[in-house]
Image (spheres, grey):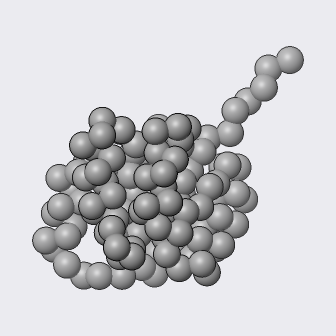
Amino acid sequence: MTTIKKKIVAVVDDDPAIRKSLHGLLSRFGYAVYTYESAEAFLDVARTSSANCLVIDIQLGDISGIELGRELAAAGLRFPIVFMTNLDDDAIEEQATQLGCVAYLHKPFSADALIEAVVKAIG
């Protein structure tokens, strides 16, 4: 009997309501979802993470989502990243693009937009 392994999405957002909402949405679409309340929390497990995709808020606590992306890249850890933000800042969007993000979603975004971005990221 063949076991189908669920694709894993890690969500990094400092807002508990957003983490809960995204966990529920992504779970309904069949993803295994792990949530992290800060960049530091994800960095603590990044080397052993099996995440197939990261969904990261730009505005986090001490370390921004962009900085998290930079730290992961500097450590040689490559994850497809979907950034999300409520900021309308072209400079930050450019930084995200330079990091190779798969999608850059402006809050509020539709469930379809998120799922489409995750599918694109995972392939």
Q: Position of residue 109 (x, y in %)?
A: 46, 75
- Residue at the location (46% across, 39% down)? 47
Q: Is residue 42 above or below residue 23?
A: above
Residue with the most extreme top position: 1
Which sits in the foreground, 48 or 53?
48
Q: Position of residue 68 (x, y in %)?
A: 33, 58
Q: Is residue 33 above or below residue 15?
A: above
- Residue at the location (65% across, 72% down)? 20
Residue 101 left/right relative to 26: left
Q: Position of residue 92 (x, y in %)?
A: 20, 70
Q: Which quarter of the image is occupied by the N terminus?
A: top right
- Residue at the location (61% across, 81% down)? 17
- Residue at the location (18% across, 61% down)? 95
Which sits in the foreground, 116 or 15?
15
Q: Is residue 119 visible?
A: no
Residue 112 left/right relative to 81: right
Residue 75 left/right relative to 123: left
Q: Is residue 36 visible?
A: yes
Q: Position of residue 9 (x, y in %)?
A: 56, 50
Residue 35 falls in image quadrant = bottom right
Residue 107 falls in image quadrant = bottom left
Q: Is residue 61 above or below residue 123?
A: below
Number of residue marks: 0
